[in-house]
Image (tube, helix red, strand yellow):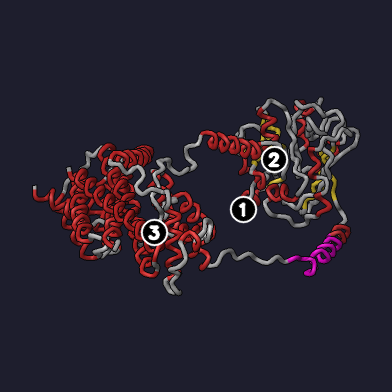
Amino acid sequence: MADSDLQSLRDRLRQTIEASVASLSEEATESDFVSILAGIGAMKQIATQLVEVDRRATTLQRAIGGAGGAAADALSSRLEELTASRAKLVDALKTLTREMGR
Amino acid sequence: MSQEADEIITILCTTEDFLRTQTALYLQFPSVLQVGLDAERRSQLILESIGFGELVPDEGTDELLRLSVDLSDEVDGPPTEETPVEEAFPPGFNEEVADDRLQTAPAPLVLDPEPEESGLGDPEETEDLLREAERTIGGAMGSDDPDTDEVAALDAGQDALVTIEDTSDPRSDLDGLFDGDEEGLDDSDLDGLGSLADSSDDDDDDDEIEIEIDEDDIEMFDLMADDEDDSPDEEETFVADLADIEKMKAKMSRDTPAVRVSAPQAAPSPRMQTPTPRVAGVAAVGVAGVAAGGAGVAAGLYGNPAVPTIRDRNSPKPAAAAIQIDDAQQAAAGHSSTGALLEEEEVLELGSSEDYGEEEEDIEGGGGLSLDVQEYDDEEEEEEEEEEFDDIELEELEPDDIALEPIDEGPTPEEIAALMDRAVAAVEDGDMEAGINLYSDALDSDPENVDAHVARGRLYLDYGDYSRAMSDFMHAESLQPDNPEPQIAVGDLHFARKDYSRAIDYFNEALKMSPDHAMAFCRRGISHYYRKHYKQALEDLNKARKLDDDIPNIRTYIAMAKKKAKR
């Protein structure tokens, strides 16, 4: 798992959100709030799913270590699927972070 | 592995909470809800637009989880390399375990945009609630309450005049009637009082009310019902002359009744002995308060001030009639029943028989109850009666007969604290209504719980219910005038109403009480910020951060203030 990738994403996300919040002024409209809240909501769902995927992947990795033969192959196949899903989730977070920064 | 993801979620949740708070401050309540719903819908659209309508396929997830659960359990045991997965974990195997794990696992992605039912917007439920409320109100105003029934009947144009109807506890009527002076009151004397308004048709009976007066001159008034006086339009009049009581008695024994009490719908058949209102030269007649029923008595009935009537305090129309003999001593002691006069504050004065004669034309031709006056000359007889009465009282007050019920001390402080904890947990879970209910439960048990008042007020404030919020805050302030929390809460309320100047005043008050209150500095700083006093805002926010670095979003606030202050 590319943790460094996720770390940089976390830092960038923090900066982006602080900037977005700071841009809200007293004259902010409902639409402004909706935009930011919607972006945050979407990212939160993706991040939640990311955590879940990581949790499952960890469990699978432990299981693979104790399994063998066909079982290990099946579990490895599942783990690859999860890894692919995780990569998509990280990409989605990056995309949303970029969108929010605009 | 997912530490970074957890941190991202923390950042997102913190920011979301902050923005929702800001939304509540900027926008009115309906708009706040709308913003939340719109944001949820739009976030779903965003997810779909980037191809994450369904992020991780559900297909196979359960199986995967089941596999991972079972295999993780096997890590500690011997490996099962020879056993195929399908045989080792047949369909349905260990599903309960898997379900349990699912329930305890972190919440999976839920993409259902439907908001949870809040119970606020369902029209059918609202109609049911309204109907229930109407039934409740109708019950309170309806036939269960004789007093309100009578008022309702009068409102409907009926001329029901004598309406002491509550027969369940006649003593309660007398409580208001005699202002607690119940010396000599006997249960037997009360019997039949409640039947004043009974719809008895036995008008032929000479029903009477005896009023015993404990004075050197002992008088007995007999209010004798007159056969002819059963018209609803008849009026009630009580006249007594204590100074010339014998003359009055003689006068009343003639054809014309001295006192008429009309019972239009019910011929009264009471017999009661009153306690002992002392009678001076001039007695006021006419007023009694039925305290328990919330009714007052005013002399005058439908424009005739000579008729004593009981009025409901909320209704100008009379609800019942009653009689009380009052005197100057009672008046001086503040017990004067005339004090309960509501509209026609006219007190009938007892005059001599000659005086009465001048009013004779007013009372002729009517039936109703007449006032008969008797006198006890034999003091020994009276003393004997009192002794008998005392004996009865002693027998009735045997301690064994008194049932002592255990006193319900209510919830313990620990139970109240548990309620508070549950309320906090409910609010943290986003269930504000449950939080309000739990705080209300805590306040039912401990009405002087300042924390509960402030916390519930803040929830009302989040709902935009400023009046209830202010009520709770003011109550908390009255309970603990030196506590800064209610001051800050009131300041937040004004802040929410964008009255930043007044909010700052309350934050100043809070800081006078607690000069190191970090949240007060923070809130005042934000108020300064929105008043565009950025330097003051930055100063306050920096103080707040020095005092408490863990204030949510304090860095964000400082960054915002710095940014504005530089310009």
Q: Which residues are magenta?
A: B386-403
* Dot 3: chain letter: A
For residue B8: magenta?
no
Above or below residue B331? Residue A28 is: above
Q: Report the mark closest to the observer, 2 or 3.
A: 3
Q: Are marks 2 and 1 on the same chain?
A: yes
C-alpha span from label 2 to label 1: 33 Å
Label drawn at residue A74: 3
Label drawn at residue B145: 2
**Left or right, residue B349 beside residue B17:** right
Q: Which residue is mark 1?
A: B333
Q: Are marks 2 and 3 on the same chain?
A: no
C-alpha span from label 2 to label 3: 77 Å
- Location of residue B296 in the rendering, given as x and y in whole percent from the top left corner: 64, 41
Residue drawn at (22%, 56%) of the image: A10
Q: Main secondary structure of the magenta part?
A: helix
Q: Say what secondary structure mark 1 lies in.
A: loop
For residue B400: magenta?
yes
Q: Earlier in the sequence, mark 2 or mark 1?
A: 2
Q: Nearer the viewer, residue B144 or B17?
A: B17
Mark 2 touches mark 3? (CB < 8 Å): no
* Dot 1: chain letter: B
Q: Looking at the picture, which amino acid does disc 3 mark?
A: Ala
- Location of residue B76 in the rendering, given as x and y in whole percent from the top left corner: 43, 74
- Dot 2 surroundings within 10 Å: few (below 14), some, or many (20 or more)? some
Q: Say what secondary structure mark 2 lies in.
A: loop
Q: Say what secondary structure mark 3 lies in.
A: helix
